[in-house]
Image (cartoon, rainbow, N blue to C red):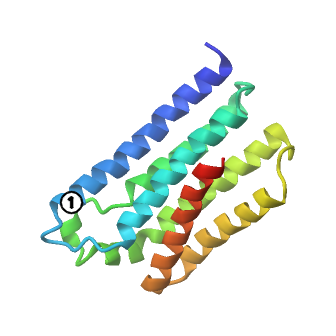
């Protein structure tokens, strides 16, 4: 087994559990949809988390083929995956019936979820730059990173639900667009 296979296999398992956690949360709120309105915000937040987790797999595959296994690489991977798992675990409420709507839940928990996504990406980008340098990074990548973090920051601090809906859709559109140009 190569160092990359070891690293990618272990942390992919945790990221896969994060994906399953979001899917399980969605299943739970779908069961409760007659009691608690779903709204748009929490399901779109879940989609953002799912897309971002998938992007980590792509980034890992493309940038860490030559990784050296050591405490630093394992601790960084552990930090990223645990933050993602915890963020995924709170995308949806444990008991939807405790909330008047999922939009209320979103208002209460979005900062934790999006803060986790922001932190995981900040750690991942820092680690990537430390491992591979800035080779291959150009103006477009810098602008996309600024937009990515700017949208996350705006989603965290802006309270208006309509603005959050637009920002979530913009962020998701950016994710989908990257899939076609990457």
Residue at left 64%, top 33%?
Answer: 61
Looking at the picture, how far across and down is residue 78, in whole percent?
58, 39
Write down the quadrant of residue 171 in the picture: bottom right
Looking at the picture, how far across and down is residue 179, in whole percent?
58, 50
Q: Nearer the viewer, residue 175 or 1?
A: 175
Is residue 78 visible in the rendered image? The answer is no
Q: Is residue 87 left or right of residue 135?
A: left
Write down the quadrant of residue 69 in the picture: top right
Residue at left 68%, top 47%?
Answer: 124
Q: What residue sits right under mark 1 in the picture? A: 30
Above/below status of 131 relative to 141: above
Q: Quadrant of the N terminus?
A: top right
How many other residues sit within 10 Å of disc 1, few (<14), some (14-19) or many (≥20)? some
Q: Is residue 39 left or right of residue 168?
A: left
Q: Is residue 139 left or right of residue 160?
A: right
Q: Nearer the viewer, residue 75 or 160?
A: 160
Looking at the picture, how far across and down is residue 5, in whole percent?
60, 21
């Amino acid at each position: 087994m190569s160092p990359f296979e070891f690293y990618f296999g272990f942390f992919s398992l945790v990221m896969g559990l994060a994906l399953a956690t979001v899917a399980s949360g969605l299943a739970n709120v779908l069961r409760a949809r007659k009691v608690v309105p779903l709204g748009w915000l929490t399901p779109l937040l879940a989609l953002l988390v799912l897309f971002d987790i998938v992007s980590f797999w792509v980034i890992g595959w493309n940038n860490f083929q030559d990784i050296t296994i050591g405490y630093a690489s394992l601790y960084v991977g552990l930090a990223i995956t645990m933050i993602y798992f915890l963020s995924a675990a709170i995308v949806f409420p444990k008991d939807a019936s405790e909330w008047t709507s999922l939009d209320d839940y979103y208002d209460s928990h979005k900062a934790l979820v999006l803060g986790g996504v922001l932190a995981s990406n900040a750690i991942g980008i820092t680690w990537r730059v430390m491992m591979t340098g800035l080779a291959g990074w150009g103006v477009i990548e810098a602008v996309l990173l600024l937009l990515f973090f700017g949208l996350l920051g705006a989603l965290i601090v802006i309270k208006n639900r309509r603005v959050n809906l637009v920002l979530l859709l913009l962020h998701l559109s950016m994710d989908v667009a990257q899939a076609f140009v990457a």
